[in-house]
Amino acid sequence: MEENLAAYAPTELETENIPTLLRRYAVPAIIAMTASSLYNLVDSIFIGQGVGALAISGLAVTFPLMNLSAALGTLVGIGGATMVSVFLGMKKYKAANKVLGNTFTLNVMTGLIFMLAALYWLEPILRFFGASDATLPYAAQYMTIILWGNIITHLYFGLNGIMRAGGHPRNAMYLTLFTVVINSLLDPLFIFVLHWGIAGAAWATVISQTLAFLVIMFEFSNPNRVLHFKLKSFIPNWHIAWDSLSIGMSPFLMNAAACLVTMVINRQLLLYSGDLGVGSFGICNRVTFVFVMVCLGLTQGMQPIAGYNYGARLYTRVRAVYNRTVWLATIVVSVCSILCVFFPRAVVSLFTHDEALICLAAHNLSIMNCLMFIVGYHMITTNLFQCLGMVRQSIFLSLVRQLIYLVPLLYILPRFLGADGVWWSMPVSDVLSCLTALVMRASLLKKFDRLQDGDDSAILGSKL
């Protein structure tokens, strides 16, 4: 059976030249991730224009809870995708299929638990995250609908990542574009025509992801694919589950930390500049998120290449794809810095006609992203450790920016700078975290220098 499946394996990952290969895998991932961020952006634009400034503030309050949901999805999905890449590089196709089935099962379990817990405690959670009496109705209405679709969301993102890791980046991209198109069509219909308000944006998101999930299920039901569903593979394998969750722990903790950080930012802004301050963060966060998602698309393009070649013990190719991805990510985030520092008002005006909110958000956007050009390096370096199964290092780099540097700064700087201190905390933490990544990268590359292609990888201390 392993020999039969080998004919369908993505062997170009170890033979094609790196620039061509990265373009082939990263471009679809970038398009998919950018499109994914765009439908969040579209939601914000339609909500701001069709419902109002307080609705944007209410939407911003939901970000921590949505980040926490995404964290649980990445805990399973990214760990599973990484293991699939490595197993394909090792030509262990049965093991890769077991990971696929277990990823499905674990996503259902985590999605169901999160949905029930969040729905039961929704109002106190939203108040804890910074909702006021004015913004709570919007936030609760939006999140209730999103949470009912939570299991589908987890499965859609998790299986989409495995489809990409399994050598089908274009299919993964087309599915994401499909969700964007459906969401963008349903948003104006539900908000402006049917007058469903912020609930319309939530329904548009859930419906579009459900349709995409059904397509993914059809794709993985094809027995001629290297990766396909088998009934036995859905039975939980606790060894696979543990390894998958361990590898996925880094992005999980990063997203969980983002949840905490967003909550702290919302509460600090509510204290220092009120509901409009929270709304301005909602806008700034959405804008920055577009460029972050492009970088995440680059990391997703790098992940199957680095993971596969690491499994095949082709270390020169691992290093080459990492270096190229760092440069590309730096270019992307530099564009973000330029737009946000020199044209902040034009960017913010897309979201609202409220002059007070425009002025506040434009000022804050320029501060928040003034040093954004260094962030890509930290993101790609963190992902490299994750691709190699180096769990502790990846977890540390995931947390260092948000918990070790940013959270303390969010409480310290506002004491001296007021509301501006909240915004200056972000670029300062970016500098500190990039310096940390630089030191850890130097240590890793020293170990890489001792390896020749084909050598045992135990020297790296990898989990895989």
Image: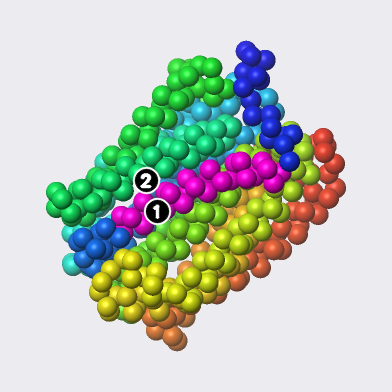
Say which amino acid is labelled 1.
Leu
Give me the disc on residue 165: none
**438 left or right of 248 in image:** right
Identify whether 271 is placed above or below 51. below
Q: In which quarter of the image is residue 147?
A: top left
Give me the disc on residue 38: 1
Decide: few, some or many residues near mark 1? Use Cα within 10 Å; few <14, some 14-19, many ≥20.
many
Q: Position of residue 158 (x, y in %)?
A: 46, 38
Residue 257 versus residue 352: which sits nearer the camera? 352
Q: Report the quarter where the C terminus lies.
A: top right
Read off the residue under disc 2: 180
Q: Position of residue 93 (x, y in %)?
A: 62, 23
Q: Position of residue 408 (x, y in %)?
A: 49, 72
Q: Does the rendering let one see residue 153?
A: no
Span shown in magenta? 18-44
Q: Where is residue 429 in the image (x, y as percent from the top left)?
A: 55, 71
Identify whether 276 is placed above or below 196. below
Say which amino acid is labelled 2.
Val
Q: Circles 1 and 2: CB distance less than 8 Å? A: yes
